[in-house]
Image (cartoon, grey):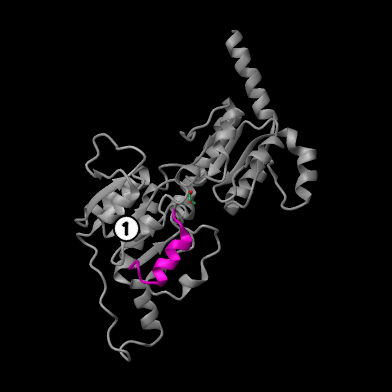
Amino acid sequence: TAEASVKEAAVQTVSGGRVLQVGTLKPSLTATLSEKYDALTLPLGEVRSGFLAEHGETVTAVVTSGRTGVDAALMTELPNLGAIVHFGVGYDTTDVERAEELGIGVSNTPDVLTDCVADTAVGLLIDTLRGFSASDRFVRAGRWPAEGNFPLTRKVSGTRVGIVGLGRIGSAIAARLTGFGCTISYHNRREIPGSPFAYVDSAAALAAGVDVLIVAAAGGKGTQKLVDREVLEALGPDGYLINVARGSVVDEDALVELLIERKLAGAGLDVFTREPHVPEALLALDTVVLLPHVGSGTTETRAAMEALTLQNLDEYLAQGTLTTPVLE
Ligand code: DGY
């Protein structure tokens, strides 16, 4: 049929192109991309423009991660690009609006990392309130019992927790903390019909009514500094901030300042504004727990993310569609 031959032509166009890796990926994924897909890798720096002039037109699919992404400028240098496949759930480094205008499909790896990122949020919350990392440093430095007991910390069970971004990950965090007897409220762009948790229509109002504010909102233009100075001040000197989402969602300068001035009780951070840069002042503070963006970093989850990345790529190369396209 005509429909079948149109599809066949589309498949040929799609699979006739090259796969391009943009940025650093998990070594096993890079190896598969090069061995099984004969993928090209975008070089860094000045050689990039020569490379794009030579290969740009042949590329139909890009595999990248949220750390690197594909901006509008790169899209114009890849005129036949049809899909941007992300390893990871976050894709804020890719210009999704521009991709949509150009008819380029974008996928990520949702769901498979929800458990681990939610586990990380809860782990950070417990560590930050109970000071486990700081206690560990206390023991290792031989300060116990020489300096007496470690100072008393803050009880976790029963705390009031506000979640900024009650999506898949935010909901998984809420489910875990319900088991700790925490009272959960949340702020989203819109109230979620039927949610068992109380909706608060601004981040500042949410922060004012909780002990712990957890950031689980996706990064990108719409959430840039959503947690600003006003929100952090509303959280107050007895309040804690936990961020497992993106550094860009929080005003990091204000956060550091308020932590130094003890106008916030503490923070647990897996993400930063300019990774891998961690503000120097935080290193000296025992009230903060700092993680090197490891929310999804377990063997099991990274393997599942890799498999879903390749599933998206395979589906695109075979039939021009994506398994888990991002929803705007
Ligand atoms: C993601 O998936 O976006 C994480 O931040 C990286 O693992």
Residue 214 at what x, y percent from top left? 34, 55
Range of residues picked out in magenta = 250-265
Asked if residue 41 is positioned above or below residue 144 in the image, the reply reads above
Instruction: Based on the picture, tell me whether residue 262 belongs to the magenta stretch.
Output: yes
Q: Nearer the viewer, residue 57 or 309?
A: 57
Q: Please identify the residue farthest to the front as the structure is shown.
A: 230
Residue beneath the point at 55% across and 58% down: 274
Query: Residue 82: percent from the left, percent from the top?
Result: 62, 30
Residue 120 visible in the shown view:
no
Whether disc 1's CB lies below 8 Å from ligand 1 is answered no
Q: Residue at x 51, y 57 (%)?
A: 273
- Taking the image as shown, residue 174 lies to the left or right of residue 14, namely left
Q: Is residue 259 visible?
A: yes
Q: Is residue 304 left or right of residue 30?
A: left
Query: What percent of the width, then of the height, locates residue 180?
Result: 22, 57
Mark 1 — residue? Answer: 234
Of all residues, the one furthest to the bottom in this rendering is: 146
Give the mark count. 1
Q: Amino acid at mark 1?
A: Ala
Front-lying residue, 194 or 35 = 194
Q: Is residue 159 magenta?
A: no
